[in-house]
Image: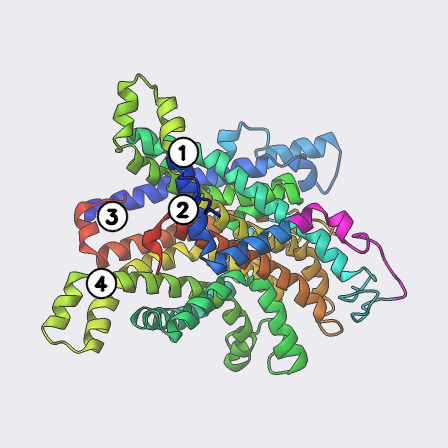
Amino acid sequence: MSVVEAPAITNPRARRRMLLRKRFMRRPMAVAGLVVVLVFVVTAIFAPLLAPYGAGATDFNALLAHPSSKHLLGTDELGRDELSRLIWGARASIQAGFFATVLAMVVAVPIGLVAGYYRGWIDTVIARITDVLLAFPFIILAVGLAAILGPSLKNATIALGVAAMPGVIRIARGEALALREEDYVPAAVANGANDFTIIFRHILPNMTSTLLVQATLIIPGAIIGEAVLSFLGLGVQPPTPSWGVMLQDAQSYLGQAPRLAVYPGLAIVLASIAFNVLGDGLRDIFDPRTTR
Amino acid sequence: MAGFLLRKVGAAIVVLLLASMLVFLGVRAIPGDPAIALGAESRDPAVLAAIRHKYLLDRPLPVQYAHWIWLAVHGDLGVDQRDLSVSHTIVSRLPISLELAFLSMIVAVAFGIPAGVIAAVRRGKVSDYAVTTSALVGLSVPHFWLGLLFIVWFAVDLHWLPANGYVSVSHPVANLEHLVMPCIVLALGLAAVLMRQMRASMLISLSADYIRTARAKGLSEQTVILRHALRNSLITVTTVIGLQLGALISGVVITETIFGIAGFGALTVEAVNQRDYTLIQGVVLVAATGYVVVNLAVDVVYAFLNPRIRASGARA
């Protein structure tokens, strides 16, 4: 019986991918983070199938009921099943986290690229605009947007995305400043490439790993942000469930049913730690220098 | 140095002017006729015209803006829906939030900086893991949830501390009792950031050449760490404290709402919930101004601490 040899991988990209995967699998924390993140995403997508009850289904025979076989985590003041609301609430969190990050990336990355690539006056103008955005603490920005557009999940997401933009602009700018000095840029110029091609075909692909790490770190911030805004009444509007809304409801029953204040918070913490750990892991595998 | 200061102040003023325009235009972008809101929902054309004339709503936007900013610079932010002076409301609420923010900052620095130093010095040991893990938890646990848990534990179950409210400084004991939980809640996230930053910059400092030199000339480990490494690391941490100010303001808003403290942060939420636009406009403008001014102060302090930046005048 002959030993089957693994085919030698010659394609450099495939080899890099394999190396990254191997490095990633060697980090149990990061793998655990990824698993938890996937569980949350699947829960959010398949909420209608997974939740034992509807998001607004009330059971007036079981108000503020203790956990039982019928209601695994008990019920809230309107007899709504806590577990089901947690599952439905994952939707708001994952939506806000995902779309706020996409919004921040789509708007901020090109701005940062242009600033870093062209430098000069355009860089100064963009830096000033970033400063103005930074002059509004996130919550003040969200408050302002909620006042102008009205409170809703969509507007809270926009506020969270806008709040994340200055940071992304700075990172993309810094990367572009460094990457434009790489040898492949003059090579592309010699090949007759225009600025657009250089920025989006040569510089952007080389910063994807940095941006990916940044994205996994913006998502947990946005998840907490959504919960905060919904808690303050500036995000998801009740009776639609969101972990922030559930915490706000629980605030009135801290004496009778403190557990109602525990579950949604645990969900937020778990989701946020999972994304943070995943982001840290990704940063480590892309940049072996930061490994401890 | 004078040039550096001038440039910094100039940039701050430009940022403030642009920010104030954004606030002004933002409030004007809100759907609905402000004259109707100001006229107590009266639809009488004569009344509306009089109101428009009185509040300059019939004039072009630049004129309105100039008028608004002129009054704002002189401390007049107009009157809110209940006909109370917005400036007066803000001035009466602000000290409460400042006390809360200041005490939290002290708590955060008192815990974050020593913990970060210990983690860096004992890198890879148990105390390092303890500090880095608690920093991760501190960053991942939302303040407002922790606040709710604190109320459940320390106020509802144990009856150690009052659940909410605020007592003025003239009753110092009651004042501090009411602020213990809010301060810890607010300080936690900040302390976590300080810990991480302190650990990272201490690690860089400790591997620098001057540390090797200091050790080589026989200084005690304590002197090396405290006098040499810590000093240089504090420079970076100063900037981080400045950058955390935005998070602090956001934290104040949330903490005050949970603990029922009638400060500036709670006022912000009230203003939006009551759709009181003059109040929103004033609150947002004051928050942005405070933020820019403190960041300017941090930049200047940073320049004083780090002569290299002062000399090159970079980061303008």
Q: Mark 2 vs mark 4: give the one in front.
A: 2
Residue B104 - label: none
Disc 2 + disc 3, Cβ < 8 Å: no
Count up the numbered dots: 4
Disc 4: which residue: B207
Q: What SS does tag 3 mark?
A: helix
Residue B67 visible in the snapshot: no
The amino acid at mark 2 is Leu
Q: What SS does tag 1 mark?
A: helix
Q: Position of residue A237 (x, y in %)?
A: 71, 49
Disc 2: which residue: A19
Q: What SS does tag 4 mark?
A: loop
Q: Mark 1 vs mark 3: give the one in front.
A: 1
Q: Which residues are magenta?
A: A42-61
Of residues A193 and A256, the one drawn nearer to the viewer in this rendering: A193
Whether A103 is drawn above or below B188: the answer is: above
Magenta span has B182?
Answer: no
The chain carrying label 3 is B
Q: Are marks 1 and 3 on the same chain?
A: no
Disc 3: which residue: B5
The amino acid at mark 1 is Pro
- The answer for how far apart the CA atoms under marks 2 and 4 are is 30 Å
- The answer for how far apart the CA atoms under marks 4 and 3 are is 33 Å
Q: Residues within 10 Å of mark 4 (few under 14, many from 20)?
A: few
Q: Are marks 4 and 3 on the same chain?
A: yes
Q: Are marks 4 and 1 on the same chain?
A: no
The quarter of the displayed image where residue B226 is located: bottom left
Q: Position of residue B21 (x, y in %)?
A: 47, 37
Disc 1: which residue: A205
- The answer for how far apart the CA atoms under marks 2 and 3 are is 50 Å
